[in-house]
Image (cartoon, grey):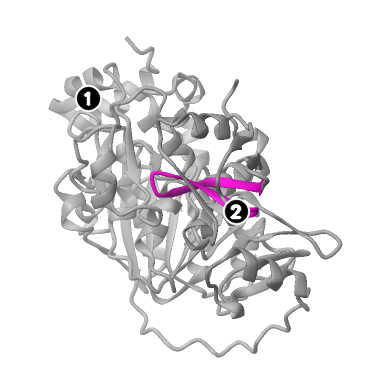
């Protein structure tokens, strides 16, 4: 049995009443794992033909499945970014709103990247995602996951939300606020969250969440949406935070979430003193009712009439060395020349329609590589995001000897012609090699390699 704090149990008993015993039994039960198919790398239909990780679908996520596979993170399909392992309840917030393909979306508290990568799969070629994480080490993890999935038109930033609001005022159609919280919804899988819980921490988290929401408002376009989410059950961090926000912002309204999410969640709680009559539109994901950990979510809409943002004058682009275009011409079948830019000293592939000031981003678009004396050393991200468009491809299967050698950082023999080539596993890019005289010289990053 979990050693749950007595004050927490008392609070949950008051909240859940007759459902309390079922909740406690669920918290002491087995955790539930899930994964999503990265539809920017492989279609859902094609993945289902090779799926070995579990066939039971998550009912509110079109490309989501419950995970039934040990050490999935070591599998070549994971290395190739075909899947993202994510707790099923945590997938629900990104399904609350109908996201349009050409939107600009901000994920304010994004690491490790589950909701960010889920949202990016909903955006089209014109859509753009900015993912922010305040802690540098976690921002590196976030960037690594976006890189592994080969996602284009993404920016990662590492700043507090006050600075974020100053950097990107009124830029986004939708903002995900997956706010840091007291973590009550994670008690089943995280004993540290139990040890760190206190009513004082709940109060502190609620104050921080209110501040983050205020900064989110400054980043949002008129007519835009905020998805507010936590992985906790406390009224202070959930319904009370939403109600206080709506009281302070009459230009916002609380909307119903998508039907699939509604059908697998419980209504928001109407508490004494609640001023939001439709607080039931907010949703609670309980482990005793649905397969997953605890979650809260609310869909907030800015009612102001959208207006056309003023046209931003084109940013004067840094001159791009001819060697960059020579490299791209020799490596790719095709590319859009206007998307080739310089950012923080490196060539990147990124939309010219969204300004990211120098020094602002941890990562901006797809890093093509490093320029060294008229020579381009390609970045791993370039292989992962642009692999489908490579002229030279080495096609391998997940059970081949060569793919295991590649993932261990070893070279292997190949009939591919000389030059930079992308390694594909069952049709998806997993990294790059430099081919010379029948040898594929490995360029898989050391930090990602399987142990020999």
Q: Position of residue 426 (x, y in %)?
A: 38, 44
- Label 1 environment density (alpha carbons within 10 Å; few <14, some 14–19, many ≥20): some
Residue located at (60% from left, 35% from top): 412
Q: Is residue 40 visible?
A: yes
Main SS, magenta residues: strand
Image position of 360 (left or right of 141)? right
Residue 211 can be seen in this image: no
Query: Which residue is disc 2 drawn over?
Result: 417
Which residue range is magenta in the image?
417-435
Real-space CA distance between mark 2 and mark 1, rounded to the nearest whole angstrom = 60 Å
| Residue 28 percent location from the top left of the image | 29, 16
Q: Reply yes or no: does residue 218 show up in magenta.
A: no
Front residue (pair 415, 145): 415
Residue 160 is tagged as none
Quadrant in which residue 349 is drawn: bottom right
Residue 199: x, y in percent? Answer: 45, 30
Task: Decide which of 364, 279 is in the foreground and name it.
Answer: 364
Mark closer to the chain start, 2 or 1: 1
Residue drawn 70% across and 66% down? 347
The secondary element bearing badge 2 is classed as loop
Write down the residue under mark 1.
23
Residue 421: say if magenta: yes
Please name the residue shown 59% across and 37% down the image.
413
Q: Residue at x 60, y 20 (%)?
A: 452
Quarter of the image with the N terminus is: top left
């Amino acid at each position: 049995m979990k050693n749950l704090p007595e004050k927490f149990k008392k609070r949950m008993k008051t909240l859940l009443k007759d459902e309390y015993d079922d909740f406690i039994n669920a918290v002491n039960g087995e955790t539930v794992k899930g994964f999503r198919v990265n539809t920017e790398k492989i279609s859902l239909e094609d993945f289902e033909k090779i799926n070995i990780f579990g066939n039971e679908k998550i009912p509110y996520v079109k490309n989501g499945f419950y995970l039934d596979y040990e050490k999935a993170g070591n599998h070549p399909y994971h290395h190739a970014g075909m899947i993202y392992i994510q707790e099923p309840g945590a997938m629900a917030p990104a399904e609350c709103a109908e996201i349009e393909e050409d939107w600009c979306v901000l994920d304010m508290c994004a690491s490790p990247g589950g909701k960010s990568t889920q949202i990016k799969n909903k955006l089209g070629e014109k859509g753009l995602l900015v993912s922010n994480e305040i802690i540098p080490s976690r921002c590196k993890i976030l960037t690594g996951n976006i890189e592994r999935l080969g996602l284009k038109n993404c920016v990662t930033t590492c700043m507090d939300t006050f600075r974020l609001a100053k950097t990107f005022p009124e830029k986004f159609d939708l903002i995900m606020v997956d706010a840091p919280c007291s973590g009550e919804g994670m008690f089943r899988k995280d004993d540290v969250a139990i040890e760190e819980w206190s009513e004082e921490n709940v109060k502190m988290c609620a104050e921080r969440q209110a501040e983050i929401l205020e900064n989110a408002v400054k980043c949002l376009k008129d007519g835009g949406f905020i998805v507010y989410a936590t992985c906790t059950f406390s009224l202070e961090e959930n319904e009370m935070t939403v109600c206080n926000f709506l009281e302070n912002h009459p230009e916002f309204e609380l909307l119903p979430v998508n039907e699939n999410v509604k059908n697998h969640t419980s209504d928001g709680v109407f508490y004494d003193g609640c001023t939001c009559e439709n607080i039931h539109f907010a949703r609670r994901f309980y482990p005793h009712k649905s397969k997953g950990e605890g979650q809260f979510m609310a869909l907030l809409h800015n009612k102001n009439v959208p207006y056309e943002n003023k046209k931003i004058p084109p940013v004067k682009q840094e001159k791009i060395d001819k060697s960059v275009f020579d490299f791209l011409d020799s490596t790719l079948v095709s590319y859009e020349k206007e998307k080739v830019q310089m950012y923080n000293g490196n060539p990147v592939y990124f939309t010219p329609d969204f300004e990211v000031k120098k020094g602002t981003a941890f990562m901006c678009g797809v890093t093509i590589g490093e320029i060294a004396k008229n020579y381009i050393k390609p970045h791993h991200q370039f292989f992962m995001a642009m692999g489908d468009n490579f002229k030279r491809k080495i096609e391998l299967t997940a059970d081949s000897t060569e793919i295991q050698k590649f993932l261990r950082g070893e070279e292997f023999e190949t009939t591919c012609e000389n030059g930079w080539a992308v390694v594909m596993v069952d049709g998806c890019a997993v990294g790059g090699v430099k081919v010379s005289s029948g040898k594929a010289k490995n360029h898989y990053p050391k930090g990602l390699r399987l142990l020999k």
